Amino acid sequence: MDSLETLRFDYKLSFLVIICLSLLVGCGTINPEPFGKFTTSLQEVRTGADEALKYNDTANRDRYIEETAEFSQTSGGSEAVQNLLIQGVEDEPFAWEMNNVPLFMISPQFRAGVYTLNNTLIAYSELLATLSGSDIVSQTEFDDMAKDLNASLKSAATTLQLKDSQNIVGIISAGASQAAYSYINHKRLKNLRDILEKNQPLIVELSNKLQAAIRIAVRNLRQNYDENSIRLARELRPNTSVKIEARKKTVMKLIELNEDFLTRLRILEALNNSYRSLPKAHTELMNAVEKPGYDLAAVKGLYENGKHMYDLYRELNESK
């Protein structure tokens, strides 16, 4: 091979190398660890949320019993009793209705909606982990998983009666699906990042809605506290025949009620902080796709908040 042919061969070889390198840009092995950490963190948050809202269910039921029993002794007591009765619906054998559905019967539905929403977020993070892993995922398999996720999200939105719930398309947008198809076909890092970028607006929206749900839970908690604390405070009024020992017991009950309320308020605050940091944690996943070793501060924060809630629950149980 003469020098000219050698030069041409080297040029062609260099050209092929450049083409290959350009095709490989954005490709590479993706570390699934950040997605696994995101899933674990969301699982901790889900447990904390369910326990926090479960308390309101019990407190609402106890308060309803107290109020209905007291009201039943008044002149309008028959109405309170009537409100306890469940009525059937004509031509709908499995349907029921009440004059005024008590809050303690509504709050479990609210808790179920939040739980389903948390499950949806966890399933979404698991889908991301699956895509980032070495296992091959077909477009059909992805479509099935995305369909289940979107149905779960709409179900949660309807249960929670979220504003514009019927307009929520799903947690996997059309743009994200197209990015996923490209990723499945080419395994390019850019395509996986595109999935996350296109879903970021919905993650922000869900974060806001979950924070709103926790604010509802806080109002409910305060309402139960106000009712119980006022009832105890009445027993400590001056100029009554209540003896000092009975007063001491009432003071102790009021102190314990305060301690319980403040701990539960801290739990809900930690939960609210978790949901507030959700968009940032999701953004960290975007950066981690192309930057191995990227600091997952918000993802770690989600996990730590979940652990913190667990510690607060343990504190509550040990104090009883």
Image (tube, rainbow, N blue to C red):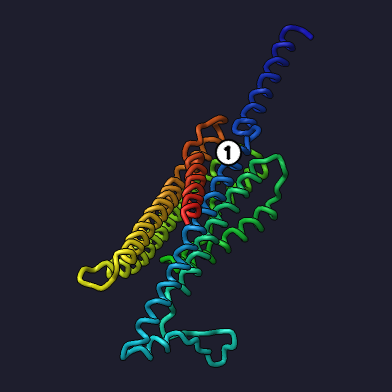
Q: In the depicted view, which residue is nearer to us: 91 or 303?
A: 303
Taking the spot 53% from the left edge, 56% from the top edge, the residue there is: 118
Taking the spot 52% from the left edge, 39% from the top edge, the residue there is: 286
Q: Amino acid at mark 1?
A: Pro
Give the image location of residue 149, x and y in percent. 59, 58
Taking the spot 43% from the left edge, 55% from the top edge, the residue there is: 205
Taking the spot 47% from the left edge, 61% from the top edge, the residue there is: 53
Q: Is residue 93 left or right of residue 249?
A: right
Picture layout, residue 155 above or below residue 21: below
Picture layout, residue 284 above or below residue 226: above
| Quarter of the view holding residue 25 | top right
Task: Report the number of numbered marks.
Answer: 1
Kindly give the residue lying farthest to the right in the view shown. Answer: 1
Picture layout, residue 145 above or below residue 223: above
Give the image location of residue 197, x and y in percent. 50, 45
Give the image location of residue 317, x and y in percent. 50, 54
Report whether residue 226 is seen.
Answer: no
Q: Quadrant of the N terminus?
A: top right
| Quarter of the view holding residue 245 | bottom left
Which secondary structure, mark 1?
helix
Kindly give the residue lying farthest to the top in the view shown. Answer: 3
> Which residue has dot 1 on it?
34
Crowding at label 1, few (<14), some or many (≥20) Cα neighbours within 10 Å?
Answer: many
Give the image location of residue 102, x and y in percent. 43, 77
Kindly give the residue lying farthest to the left in the view shown. Answer: 239
Report whether residue 260 is seen.
Answer: yes
Q: In the depicted view, which residue is nearer to us: 206 or 252?
A: 252
Q: In the depicted view, which residue is nearer to us: 287 or 238?
A: 238
Q: In the depicted view, which residue is nearer to us: 122 or 204?
A: 122
